[in-house]
Image (tube, rainbow, N blue to C red):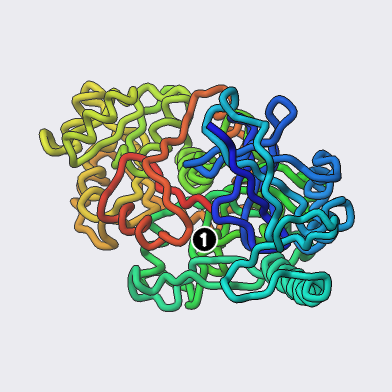
Amino acid sequence: MKTQTSFIDLTERPPRGFRVRLGNYVILARMLDKGRATLARKNGEYNYNSGTDQHLVRFLGFDPEALLKELAAGKGDGEILEWVQSHSKTPRAPWEIEAGPRSWKSMDRTATPKRSSFLPDTSGNSARPARTSKPGLKPLNLMTMSVLEEKRNSHIHKNNEEQKDRKTKRTKHMRAMRAEQFNGYNELKLVDLPKPAVTDGKVLVRITAAGVTPLDHTILSGNFHGSKAPLVLGNEGAGVVEEGGGTDFPAGSRVMFFGAYGAFENGTYCEWIAVRKKDLCLIPDGVDEVSAAGIPVAYLTAQVGLTRAGFRAGKTVFAPAIGGSIGNAVTQLARALGATHAMSSTTNHAKAEQAKALGFNEVIDTSLEKLADGVRRITGGYGADIVIDGIGGEVLSEALGALALEGSLTTLGYSASRKTTIDVTNLIVPQASIRSLNMFVQPPAAISDAWNVIVSLLKSGAIKPIVAKTFPLAEAADALRYLIDGRPFGRVILKI
């Protein structure tokens, strides 16, 4: 099979899907106007693969490696075009592409190339005039070429200016999912906001993942005190430090954090955020950023709750909702820290089986037995020294009946309901107590101590966050709906 030769003038718009590949190794990506290209070498030659055709590419008049360096230097498309023109010995046709068969070995390299329709004949040996793209038009000559060059230079200048404008806007603005009002999922909108500035005591973090929590839904539904719309949701996240971290958190450090973000100030459903340095924690090696984004709220709350309740090795602990963030975190931490029993529950039989498959062997299936009966069964009639409840409603009432002598119940959430009815004898007879936990008012020392415990256990592998599903930033409303209505086993995370 003979090859056909055609010319592509890369000062014009490149073919759609233009690519040059080195086998499976792509060594460069980015080129030209609004198109994309990759350059790669195979056995000293350059391969163009459109997906349906395979071609051989020859550079005319300059070293392609030099072009790669120009591209790697981050120059704009206009600058690259000017460089190609000034270094090519063949004006306006810096690339020659021989279209041929898909096999490299069978390609015929002896075919006589056809002259480019873009080039005037200056040799005096042409047997015919240069071709034109439309019938009835005169062939290009040196005079018309100068006019085209002027138009092209104008286009290049305009293109460079547009690129600079886009780059300036991109570096000064960011995408965010903001609640315009607190009236349900439809109020979450993708907006463009100014990129936050670094101020004293704050660190600029590029968000890579954000945790989705029941609190976000509570705020979006208008059921949380103190939050004001419009508000970017999300009070936990993970990302990379860009500026302002000092020696403790140098640029490039991977961090995770929790705070008043997404409740009393803009939160983590965005691309950048200015975080108070005291809220940051370095992500341990071996923990990916998606998993890390689901650690702060659940594990800090669980550890602070256990500490305030007087936990120590040998205690019995119960936290309802094994598939939820708090229930799972309390169970993992209590087990890792030496609890005699680290118990949880679920109303779903399939979820109970899933928990057992993941190694949670003290999960009460409340579709088969009452919560208090399950706790007594597991503990041999003793009960729970510590209950950490993030559910509220009837679950809280039932959990009180599972308390051991002088046991305590800590209430810290109300995803089921804010209201419940209790049997006071469940407190009087065992001399038990109820206490509460508000993470927004904890002293920095309590948070720091909790992080120390959590990071140590993460490094040892004694605890491991569970991620159920991830969503892109623009689908934050769907992520929240999945968390609340789907009730997954594990965390829901936005990847940004």
**Residue 123 placed where, x, y %?**
85, 55
Total numbered labels placed on residues in the image: 1
In which quarter of the view is residue 478 placed?
bottom left
Q: Nearer the viewer, residue 174 or 159?
A: 159
Residue 226 image point, x, y percent? 48, 73
Horizontal relation, residue 420 to residue 250: left or right: left
Q: Nearer the viewer, residue 105 or 333?
A: 105
Q: Is residue 15 left or right of residue 384?
A: right
Can I make out residue 393 in this image? yes
Q: Is residue 451 above or below residue 357?
A: below
Q: Position of residue 482 (x, y in %)?
A: 31, 53
**Residue 14 or residue 472, whichever sits in front:** 14
Kindly identify which residue carries mark 1.
Answer: 269
Extreme residue toward the left, this view:
368
Q: Is residue 346 above or below residue 11?
A: above
The disc labelled 1 sits on which kind of residue?
Tyr
Residue at x-position 73% and y-position 69%: 140
